[in-house]
Image: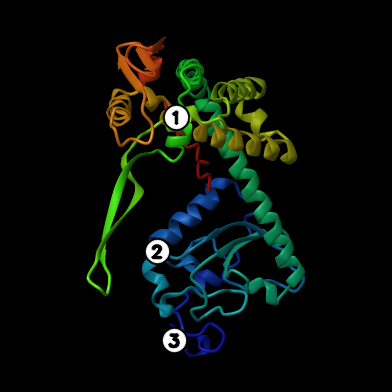
Amino acid sequence: MLNEQSDYGKQPFIDIPASAFEVKAIYWTEPDRSVIKEIKAFVAKTGRPYLWPRHTHTKPPKGARPVYLGEFDLPEAYLRNSTLHSPCPCCCPKKPKFALHGKIAWFPDEGVIRLIGPDCFKTLNPSGHEEAVAELRRREARESDIAYLLRLAQNVRFIRDAIDENLEIATAVEKMRNGVLAALDEHNIPLWNHVRNGELKITKEKIRVSQSASGATSRTSKIIQKTYAHIKGYELVSPFYSSIVLSLTNARKMLDAIDLSAKSVAEIEGMDDATRTTTARGLKQTLAELREKLQKLDELRRFASFETIKTLKTWATREDAALNFHVDRKDDKLVIGASPIKCTRLLIDLAVDRNVTWIEEMKATDFN
């Protein structure tokens, strides 16, 4: 590809129609979003911004100050061939100049739109360019926040329902955890010490036979540990557990306090930027933490699964297991103890067997 700084002068001239140079002074008020969408669609389809019918392909006058309404890229096929790049009315009106991050520049004092290169106007008015870029970024952030909150407002009732459903599972899991910890403590079973990374260990004797220079044979033995199996939900017995019930409850309270479902589009769009940004960030963080907790909940509930209990039971009865005890599950009863005779029977809520209700990622709608 040609070097942007030194080789554009070697590019062939582009046949620019005379109509492109005509001044289309028809935008005396800021163009609405439909114009921006139209421009982006035209560029995506044709790869030739300078042919958009209402583009003014003239150099901006001295002292002009643009408003950047958005950005655009040429189609991917155009990126690889520099001869297909677009000219820029600011600095290179008849030769290929740019392909990425083109600016939709509105010039209020002239009432025109120019589709220009990413930084080309900077050569004419550095401060005007920097101010326009800064305002564009603020505009993009504002529109992203609005789109996110509007999408969330439509889905908040489903999120609330999901939280309520998962609260039932989380409550059942935490009740089960309390019972399991009490039973382990009662029967002096230090389970966490042996499952803290999800691995169940067995001990093996490794014997080494060696022979001295005189021909004498000696045997040495060493006790080693090997991984027998992995289990899920082992962090249920961790002493560092933090309440998922509390996290879900707090998330529910935040959604109720903000109550986006009760706000109209006009109310969301009419928020001041600082309030809207703070609200959007707070909700994004809340939902991110909520999804993290649901992942954890889905893992923890599997401690009571028949697969996990069967693995634990088989391992804990082996002579070479790092820890021997008794554990079993039958229907809604979990049994834990030193032996099948000396044990504690826990009644568990079968909500622990239910699948977690997931919350979809809330992505900002592309309003551009």
Determine crowd level at label 2: few under 14, some 14-19, many 20+ residues with C-alpha closer than 10 A.
few
Q: Which amino acid type corresponds to the residue marked 3 in the rendered image?
A: Pro
Which residue is located at x 66 percent, y 49 percent?
139
Which residue is located at x 37 percent, y 27 percent?
302
- The relative height of residue 337 versus residue 216 in the rendered view (above or below) is above
- The relative height of residue 340 versus residue 313 in the rendered view (above or below) is above
Q: Check residue 53 in the rendering and tell me which mark sits there, or answer none.
A: none
- The x, y position of residue 266, in whole percent, is 64, 29
Per the image, the residue denoted by label 1 is: 191
- Structural distance between the alpha carbons of marks 3 and 1: 76 Å
Q: Which amino acid type corresponds to the residue marked 2 in the rendered image?
A: Thr
In this rendering, does residue 127 appear at all?
Answer: yes
- The x, y position of residue 2, in whole percent, is 46, 85
Per the image, the residue denoted by label 2 is: 46
Q: Which amino acid type corresponds to the residue marked 1 in the rendered image?
A: Leu
Name the image quarter holding the N terminus.
bottom left
Q: Are marks 1 and 2 in contact (CB under 8 Å)?
A: no
- Structural distance between the alpha carbons of marks 3 and 2: 19 Å
- The x, y position of residue 153, in whole percent, is 56, 27
Of marks 3 and 1, the one in the foreground: 1
Per the image, the residue denoted by label 3 is: 12
Tag count in the figure? 3
